[in-house]
Image (cartoon, rainbow, N blue to C red):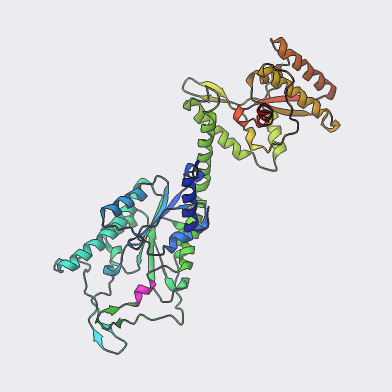
Amino acid sequence: MLCSLECIWEHRKHSIRHSRGCPRKSWGLPKFGERFSGAHAPLSHAVAQMGHIEVQRPFDLLRGSDFFSDAGREELTELLDDPFLYCEHWAPECKLFSRARGKKIRLPSGRIIAGPQPVRDANHLMGFPWLKSQMKARLRKSNSMAIKALRRGETSKQSGMPRHWTAEHPKNSWMWDFTLAKRLEGLGMEHAIGSSCCFGGARQKFYSFFGSSEEIKQRLTLECPGHQGLLTYEVEQNPDGSLYFPTEEGAEYPWALCLAYARGLRAQLDKEKVFEQVRMQARENWYQDELQKSTARLADPGTSKPVGTYLARWEQEMKPGQEEAHLRSLLQRASMRGTDVRFHLMVGTEETTQEVPYPAMLWRWKTIISFPWKQPAHINELELNAVVVTAKHRARNASKFHSRWIHVVDSTVSRGALSKGRSSSRRLNTPLRKQAAISLAQNTYMFPVWTISRWNFSDKASRKHEEA
């Protein structure tokens, strides 16, 4: 979540230089894409400021993206094929879709002249067949942009990717009479009609945002009350005889309208819990990567995937401020045969069980004791001796007597020996007896919990003595 498109692009530029790259890439954030955005792309900027949604680079000729060139079509295809595209907005050129073409124009001087050449009517929606070649070429390009936008809407509705699509044209545009547009209306898409002046525009300009998002429609549907002091649409004639239409000044969306659209999109995203789903999927992927770097059994994708999903969902239940309730829930999972806490999950097609490591890295840890061993020993013996040191340290505080406590270890051998209180190994029995004596003296009960070594933060405190 960054404040603007410029911030996003700057962030990405530095991330490419960084060896690890941008961590957002592994999240698969939902994305918004704007087609035919105009030079300044205010809608993309507004969506970027809302957060929780990535913004693709805007696509427009004035931004270096030519829809009618091979390079431009290749760029657009790349944007459309983005698997995380959640919503896109299209605003194809609308000059040749105006119903006002062909009507006479009164200039400020009072002189009446012929208006722009009409190019279509209700019986010739795609254009008059008798038009000259130059105008036909313009018309084909205009129709191509509109049809591409509408077909994309049809694709999104049928395939569900992207989830939401919107297109904008003037309220009385001929584009809304196209067969594709009528077909989309039959599929449940609706028009959000309002006027730009309701969002601070200098002139009354009725628009129609057509699409599938209820939240966007709710925020853009406004009945214009008729604002005072608005500019008029008087056409002016340039010295060279060409006409200047003030509608060109209002081609860019007012900023307030862009914010309303962005808020609607964000509300739609929150309503469908898209960001929560993305975050959950990202955590599942992270857990799977972590597990595959641990034990040989967890390295199997068939095991790491369900265990990763289980851990990601479990993480959602571990809420700050509810630590005591979480610890009590762990004690309810204690084995009746001993004092260990285990979490099993059915995995694979053979209905085998896999123990789930405790997500110890979700706690905030700090070093209490750190010292080098005086003499070498087997790793399991040293780990049990470390548990004895921890128990002795707890014995200094009488308030911790007469209690149950949980201790995290990264060795299943140590966990099993601690839960039983004995071992077939003589070397392991020595620290186990010490631990039993300390527990009896304090009237405490220890519950060992297993985690993988990557999540055992006590290793960091011991490693510094190895380096020394």
Q: Which residue lies furthest to the left in this view?
A: 130
Q: In which quarter of the image is residue 397?
A: top right
- Direction from residue 141 to residue 403 in the image, left or right: right
Depth order, front residue of 295/167: 295
> Does any portion of residue 273 appear in the rendered image?
no
The structure residue drawn at horizontal position 49% and vertical position 47%, both measured from the top left corner, is 15
State whether the magenta stretch is mostly helix, strand or loop.
helix
Residue nearest the observer in this picture, 464 or 306: 464
Residue 170 image point, x, y percent: 35, 68
On screen, residue 397 above or below 62: above
Residue nearer the viewer, 186 or 124: 124
Residues rendered magenta in the picture: 246-252
Relative to 329, 207 lies left or right:
left
Provide residue 354's location: percent of width, then percent of height: 55, 23
Image height of 150 relative to 248, above or below: above
Name the residue located 69 percent from the left edge and 22 percent from the top edge. 383
Residue 276 visible in the current orientation:
yes
Queried whether the magenta region covers residue 416, the answer comes back as no
- The residue lying furthest to the front in this view is 468
Q: How many marks?
A: 0
Residue 76 on image: x %, y %: 33, 52
The C terminus lies in quadrant: top right
